Image (cartoon, rainbow, N blue to C red):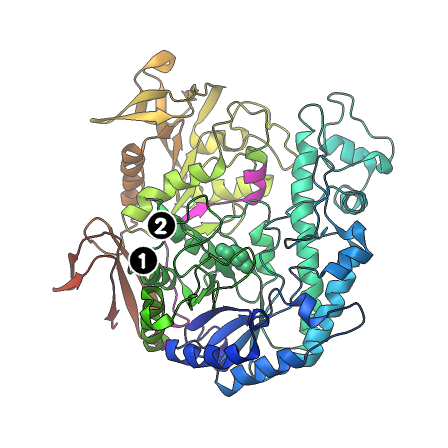
Amino acid sequence: MAGPLLGARLPHVLFGGDYSPEQWPEGVWEEDVRLMREAGVNIVSLGIFSWSRIQPSPDRFDFEWLDRVIELLHENDIRLDLATATASPPPWLSHRHPAMLPVLADGVRLWPGGRQHYCPSSPFYRDAAVALVTAMANRYGRHPALAMWHAGNEYGCHVPACYCDVSAAHFRRWLRERHGTLEELNRAWGTDFWSQRYSDWEEILPPRQTPTWPNPSQQLDYRRFCSDALLECYELERRVLAELSPGIPVTTNFMRFFKPLDYWKWADREDIVSDDVYQDPADPDAAMGSAMAADLMRSLGGGRPWILMEQTPSRVNWRPVNVAKAPGQMRLWSYQAVARGADGVMFFQWRQSRAGAEKFHSAMVPHGPPETSPTWREVVRLGRELREFDGVCGSRIHSAVAILHDWESWWALELPSKPTALLSHLPQLESYYRPLFEANVVPDFARPGDDLSAYSLVLAPSLYLVGDGAAAGLARYVDAGGTLVMSFFSGIVDEFEHVRLGGYPAPFRELLGLRVEDFLPLPQGETVDLVLGDRRGRGEIWSELVTPAGAETVARFSSGGLQGQPAVTRHRFGRGTAYYLATRPDGASMASILAEACRGAGVEAVASVPAGVEAVRRQGDDGSFLFLLNHADAGVEVPVGGQRVSLGPRDVAVVRETS
Ligand code: GLA
């Protein structure tokens, strides 16, 4: 067990939120800290959008107000997740250097007046950010209240890609690094298609708006580049912090399954993984979605605890209709994060803004008197309860199942001009995740090239793009006794988005014991019937003609042109088993296929509990914590270890299990 996330600096579950004292007269700060103490707040994210107050003009820094806030927090024993404050450049910067403003693929420039209006490649932005971080780290880098640094904020959230000339030049430098020669680039991008062969590096541009589909290999490289360009911005900040504020961990807040950034790469450069989670209370799948995000965050950190950096206490302001969380829902979803490995529960934001675009976004402290606010009461209750959870800090989750999730394959899969536009990555992931969530099997996420030997079962939902090494690794995994379930349209292209020839799915044919003769995607809204043993089901989105070559058929198509042909197969390969799904089975069919795979692989549920109750176990040094989360609107009795635990609607119990 690793011990608390922030060590002796803060040996408790982190509890707090984004704090923007610059939006309030100083008189309010005293009330802020009094209320923070009442709620058990032990850390705040400070200064995230304070750049224009910290540096009101190019050659003037004003730290005095921030000094006073920090001293006040310190006196009250509240730690700092101190922002580098680079997320929203001040007006003077873009006024002086308009070339730092980002440009969309169609040439439209984005103007200041919101936030995050910077081109990630802009030297003006980068230099100004480094100067600010240097000043911040010089001033506060060794402050006793400082517990961690918060670099930027939600990198790429509003501007994941810029297409300006500065970005174009940066892209060309990045391409030279990646491909070496122009000849290699021409090969990698398949430029003999549609007369796209380059004769000079200067001819190469980002995939700006074109008359029809831009080159897919170019688009894929641009996705990689854009993730890397923002990562460089983060790295520049991290380097300054490492030098001037040694030993203080650095994080930046992720956004669940955020497509533009390859979080595997990013997480490698973070001391702590943190995430922002905004479930829609009106979405019946909200709890599944946040469970899935939590499992991703834990996995990105290699199993280490992570921080729920932002969630809303009740409503957000950015959906067409901003439904409030039901009573108990905020507490329940906070515990869900802790159950799935979070050692911190934080909010956006501490005090609800009076002005600006987010004034109707709920906060821990509402516009009205806190005493009468149900949200505030729930915040205070949660803060008090989490004080009893020091023992949970550092405990781990042991998972026997891994779901493969790869950003490059996601990007490539969703490039246009595929057999069907109905196939996208997240619904594929969810079709695997949902039955596991409902059965209380807690999976990790893994990269296709990872060492998977610790897992009994590996799931590969449409791994469209795969490198040679990862493909060989999957075969070795099964050969050595692992169980793999893989979906259609896997192993189709290499890392350049070039088709792997010789029959689909070229790198997996032997492992799966079959060949795919043709893709037969289903028309929108149509399904195909399936027979799985003695049950019937439906396939969605996709079907294909499979010729077994060693695999046995465990389910067949039972309607349409593929009637009688294999829909699901199983193949013994070495000491292991590989399943193949030639369609996307409906939920119940998927549940039965995964239940069989789990049984075969010896994977068990965390606990046997009534439907609607989520059960997750965190394992500590001297015992474990069984989290029971009732997502239903009605109370329920849960039998555990000979006793019965009563849970009210949207209620939580944590059962201590000693080993
Ligand atoms: C994001 C940002 C916050 C705030 C919230 C509102 O998560 O990081 O600054 O805008 O959204 O939900």
In the rendered image of this protein, does residue 573 appear above or below residue 61? above
Indicate the position of residue 319 as horizontal and vertical percent values. Answer: 46, 46
Q: Residue at x 38, y 69 (%)?
A: 395
In the rendered image of this protein, does residue 340 appear above or below residue 180? below
Label 2 neighbour load within 10 Å: few <14, some 14-19, many 20+:
some
Q: In the rendered structure, are the residues bearing label 2 and label 1 in contact, judged by CB atoms less than 8 Å apart?
A: yes
Residue type at mark 1 is: Gln
Indicate the position of residue 608 as horizontal and vertical percent values. Answer: 20, 53
176 is within the stretch colored magenta: no
Residue type at mark 2 is: Pro
Indicate the position of residue 65 as horizontal and vertical percent values. Answer: 64, 79
Between the C-alphas of marks 2 and 1, the distance is: 8 Å
Residue beneath label 2, please? 281
Would residue 517 appear left or right of 646 to someone viewing this image?
Answer: right
Q: Which mark is residue 329?
A: 1
Q: In front here: 493 or 652?
A: 652
Magenta part of the chain: 390-411
* Residue 95 seen by the camera: yes
Q: In front here: 133 or 435?
A: 133
Callout 2: helix, strand or loop? loop
Would residue 283 appear left or right of 147 to someone viewing this image?
Answer: left
Q: Residue at x 62, y 51 (%)?
A: 156
